[in-house]
Amino acid sequence: MTRQPHLSVLRRAERESERGSATIEAAILVPAFGLLVLLVVLGGRIALAHQVVQSAAADAARAASLERTTTTAHNAATDAATLTLAGQQLDCAHVDVTVEATGFDAPPGAASTVTVTVSCAVDLADLTAIPGLPGTRTVEATMTSPIDRWRSQ
């Protein structure tokens, strides 16, 4: 009569053949999981940057609409956008504020608007908190504000 190996001996042999596999799995999965977390953080920071730039564009459009001339409207919009971006601690490598203020030429009583576009080039290293990460991401927002139709010229 031949004796069959005990079931626990077989299980132990199976376990021993898989020794070290958890280490290999961890070596593969931990960096992949870290990259996934980094991408989620980057996406969230880009969304936050979009919100800050939209807020800056809204503030700039409102500031421009309160002015009386195209030149002062452009200056007020630039100042308001810069102040909002700095106040929200968004560090832009380059800020561009474009003001479309043809509404200032409208006669009193006519409805008109001023449109402001704020563009901010954000370094990816600032968004991800990884120093030295190359590249920038340009975030842009456009807002429109009505000009008081009965303003004095």
Image: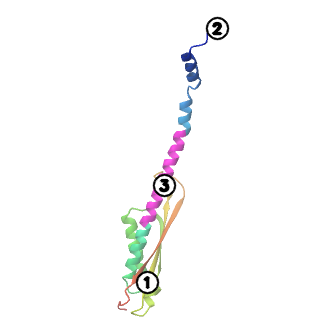
Whether residue 131 can be seen here: no
> Disc 3 residue type?
Leu
Pick the front one: 109 or 89: 109
Instruction: Give the magenta part as a residue range.
Output: 29-52
Mark 3, residue position: 42
Mark 2 surroundings within 10 Å by alpha-carbon count, few (fewer than 14), some (14 through 19), many (20 or more):
few
> Disc 2 residue type?
Thr
Q: Secondary structure at mark 2?
A: loop
Q: Is 48 within the magenta?
A: yes
Q: Label the magenta part by its dominant secondary structure.
A: helix
* Lateral position of residue 83 relative to residue 139, left or right: left
Pick the front one: 137 or 51: 51
Q: Residue at x 46, y 56 (%)?
A: 44
Mark 3 or mark 1: whose residue is earlier in sequence: 3
* Lateral position of residue 142 relative to residue 28, left or right: left
State the CA–CA distance, disc 3 to disc 1.
Answer: 35 Å
Mark 1, residue position: 113
Mark 2 or mark 3: whose residue is earlier in sequence: 2
Q: Secondary structure at mark 1?
A: strand
Mark 2, residue position: 2
- Please say if the residues under marks 2 and 3 sit with CB atoms less than 8 Å apart: no
- Please say if the residues under marks 1 and 2 sit with CB atoms less than 8 Å apart: no
> Disc 1 residue type?
Thr
Looking at the rendered image, the quarter that the C terminus falls into is: bottom left
Residue 34 position (above or below residue 78): above
State the CA–CA distance, disc 1 to disc 2.
Answer: 97 Å
Give residue 104's position: percent from left, percent from top.
43, 88
Give residue 14's position: percent from left, percent from top.
58, 22
Q: Residue at x 48, y 62 (%)?
A: 122
Q: Is 50 within the magenta?
A: yes
